[in-house]
Image (tube, helix red, strand yellow):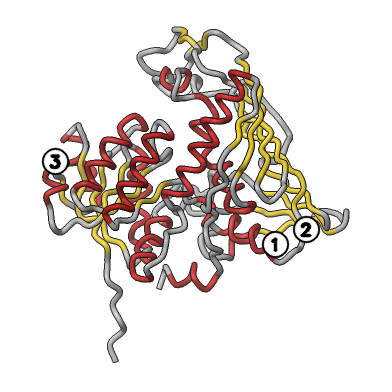
Amino acid sequence: MLKDVKPQIRIGVVGCGNISQAYLHNAAMFPAIRPVACADLNRNVADARADEFGIRALDYDEMLASSEIELILNLTVPTAHFDISLQALQAGKHVFTEKPLSATFEEGRRLVEEARARGLLIGSAPDTFLGATGRYARQQIETGRIGRVVAGTAFMMGRGMEHWHPDPTFYYQPGGGPVLDMGPYYLTMLVNLLGPVRRVQAMATSAYTERFVSAEGPLKGTSIPVNTPTTVATLLEFDKGAQITFVASWDIYRHSGRQIELHGTEGSLGLPDPDNFSGVVSLSRLGAPWQDVDTANMAFGALNWPLDAPDRGNYRMLGLADMAEALVEGRRPRASGDLALHVLEVMQAILSAGETGEAVNIDPVDCQPSAFDEIEAEKLLA
């Protein structure tokens, strides 16, 4: 008896930079998706990526006109997200974009509304919350292992980009900064676990007015101006009542704080870096010593990246595989446009509150993803 063959959604990839390698490499593990073409402003880069993965290099206009391509994977720079995604939707293509959904909340809302009006799906990275650690943590919360979540902390702290990035200028200008660059991973994980945010308070500062570039490249040995906050301390009030302190900083050389800790009426839960799909989750019940659970044996939990010496889980494309399943099942994808739009609104509120000192209220929209259990996770690999 022949095995049922899953229908595949055919994908066109726009933007062939470093992140495209992970997406295209990981696509092979998901039967429901198939990249067929790629495009880039630099045709030589697109040709090289196409040769590497056995797909076609096209101009973006050709991609939009192709009846073969059903979904556009937008891996361009954040300032181009809106234009590329809007053109794709207007051409009748579903869209999945790298984070953030767009540069502003207003643009993001336009994209979500455009998709809804056309009966199309739109989704956005990060999809890391669908990995083993995100699923295990949510299971612990929803089964009451730590009771009702009351408080918590989230720390994204490091020393910035200028010691490794050849041109880190963008990161220190409006539109960059630690909140917009790394905040999506932390905030998306928190909304997945706790539901939407309803109020934001924040303070913001910067340790330096200039950054000295030590990374190899054309700017090595020069200084670049800092025109956006590089340390932001935020208090997030969630609609279900939890209060989470979120600190995003590029002014920290070393710290010992766990990336995420949640404290409830029955215990506490600790999560690793939400930029990864896997890692160790720690649980303390009623004050007992931490019990560590390595999620490596769960779906999307094994260390697989970098390819030569894996030290983390990287399953980018998981969100698109779930979107392909959502198309078949007629539901909202978990890494949805609604979720990404809410996170974008929260990030804008953080920056506004940090600038003005005034709390910002947010409409707690229905955007928490549906739970993602092990059976559903394994199904995406079958």
Q: Amino acid at mark 1?
A: Gln
Residue 155 lies in what quarter of the image? top right
Disc marking residue 59: 3
Relative to 235, does residue 209 appear above or below in the rendering? above
Relative to 260, does residue 268 appear above or below in the rendering? below
Give neighbour class at mark 2: few <14, some 14-19, many 20+ (Cα, 10 Å).
many
Residue 360 lies in what quarter of the image? top right
Q: How many marks?
A: 3
Give the quadrant of the C terminus: bottom left
Disc marking residue 146: 2
Classify mark 1: helix, strand or loop. Answer: helix
**Cα distance in 3D space between marks 1 and 2:** 7 Å
Q: How far across and how far down the image is residue 204, in percent?
A: 63, 20
- Look at 71% across and 30% down and name the residue there: 255
Disc marking residue 140: 1
Depth check, front residue: 75 or 256: 75
Relative to 83, does residue 374 appear above or below in the rendering? below
For marks 3 and 2 on the same chain, the one whose residue lies earlier in the sequence: 3
Residue 198 lies in what quarter of the image? top right
Classify mark 2: helix, strand or loop. Answer: loop
Depth check, front residue: 285 or 148: 148
Q: How far across and how far down the image is residue 20, in percent?
A: 33, 44
Q: Amino acid at mark 3?
A: Asp
- Look at 57% across and 20% down and name the residue there: 230
For marks 1 and 2 on the same chain, the one whose residue lies earlier in the sequence: 1
Q: How far across and how far down the image is residue 367, in percent?
A: 51, 52
For marks 3 and 1 on the same chain, the one whose residue lies earlier in the sequence: 3
